[in-house]
Amino acid sequence: MSDHAVRTIELRRHFGAVRALDGLNLEVPRGTILTLLGPNGAGKTTLLRILMGMIEPTGGQALVLGAPARSQPAGVAGRIAYVGDRCEPPQWATAAMLASLQAGASRAFDKALFGELCKRRDINPKRPYGAMSKGQRRWVLTSLALASRPELVLLDEPADGLDPAARRGLYDELRGQVNESDAAAIVTTHIIADVERISDDVAIMAAGRVVLHGPLEDLRESVRQVEMSGGISPPELGELASVLGRARLGSADVVWIRRNGVDDEEILRRLGPDVTIRNVGLETLYLAITEHGSAALAEYGKGSE
Amino acid sequence: MYMHLDHHSGEPIYRQIVEAIKYQVASGQLADEDRLPSIRTLADELKINPRTVVKAYEELQHAGLVIMRHGQGVFVAVNHGATPQSVRQKAIADMARRMLAEAFRIGAPKQEVLRIIESEANKMEPEQ
């Protein structure tokens, strides 16, 4: 039994000339929630659809619950749940009908839990899906997924259309299941505040690759914003840390780094007096990588990992 | 166990837990030999991964603030504060220097800093 619910090795998927995934390496241990961040077109949805076995990779490997995504043994499919944009149920189906359908597909389906989740958002089980609001539809789909008590949950923008209270309810339920049954989850979202609240691990994707991947707690401890009012000595900084991004903000030169075993004081000592080091939140880090990452790559070579 | 976590501060969650428990011990909300919530319970309550709680408890154990008794749970250690005076004073001076540097950087005058320290200390009401 593998400790990883998901493992991809040099995963590639091309659509004609477009490299949606371009050598993607990722691991999701059981009992953890990974959030995937990245600009539109980074390859997040393609990855989830490959893991679901909906599309085939062009190359590389995608292992899901220990077996290749496209050749899952019988029974595994019911242990994986997916919510994404392209899996809309029929408009006329009521929540109760969807629950019966889902119960047929996954043996572990928990009708009582589904009923309770619907009740929490005042969703009438007899109401047809097509007559629900956008937020209610999202809630019903994610509730169906969670009530299946899956070993792996893939949620593609689950928060889309949900109000803050519903988002919190959804993620609390997800965390409860992950803790309780050692399940794993991959969640994509653009809401950084949610990422900071729910993630064990974070992966930032750009152009079909993983640019930064690690436990959120480690990133909090190791990622820093270094501001230099005078000039800097780029090679020296490259020795001390992985450079994730670089920008000129006003008169200061700003570099975002991930420290490799050196502490802030050491960096301050090596770089001299005109330097300020700050902790940064995930939002700043994300923008640093997606907006200012390529400048750093050009200058320092390969940034991280 | 009430604990406020700030998920957006950039401060690791396990460290926030460590600080919160240290504060509760210092302020007397937690007494010697009090039992801390189990890893499971605290993880469920705070909606975080149990591993994060483990990390926090290990850090507290390492710092000598709690002891883990196999099969029984985690308890507040009795002899905290028994550090030799010289070591203690150096540790506090280090902390003070860091705090003052940050306070001066954001423009707080010395008197204001001292006043805040005094008022926070009074809130904790240590046993003297």
Image (cartoon, coloured by chain):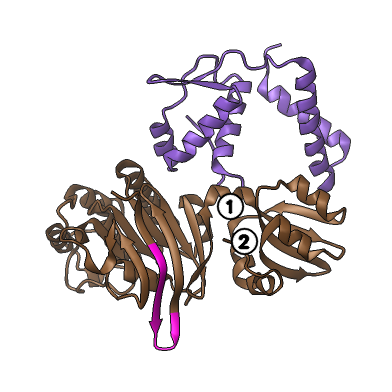
Q: Nearer the viewer, residue A303 or A49?
A: A303
Figure colour of chain A: brown
Query: Is residue B45 in sight in this rendering?
Result: yes
User: Which span of residues is magenta-colored?
Assistant: A8-19
**Principal SS element in the magenta part?**
strand
Is B31 rendered above or below residue B56? Answer: above
Residue occupied by mark 2: A285
Q: Which residue is mark 1?
A: A219
The amino acid on which the numbered mark 1 sits, given as a three-letter code, is Leu
In the foreground, A242 or A45? A242
Numbered badge on residue A12 = none
Q: Colour of chain B?
A: purple
Residue A163 percent across, percent down from the top left: 42, 60
Answer yes or no: do the residues labelled 1 and 2 have beta carbons within 8 Å?
yes
State which chain disc 2 sits on.
A
Query: Is residue A10 inside the magenta stretch?
Result: yes
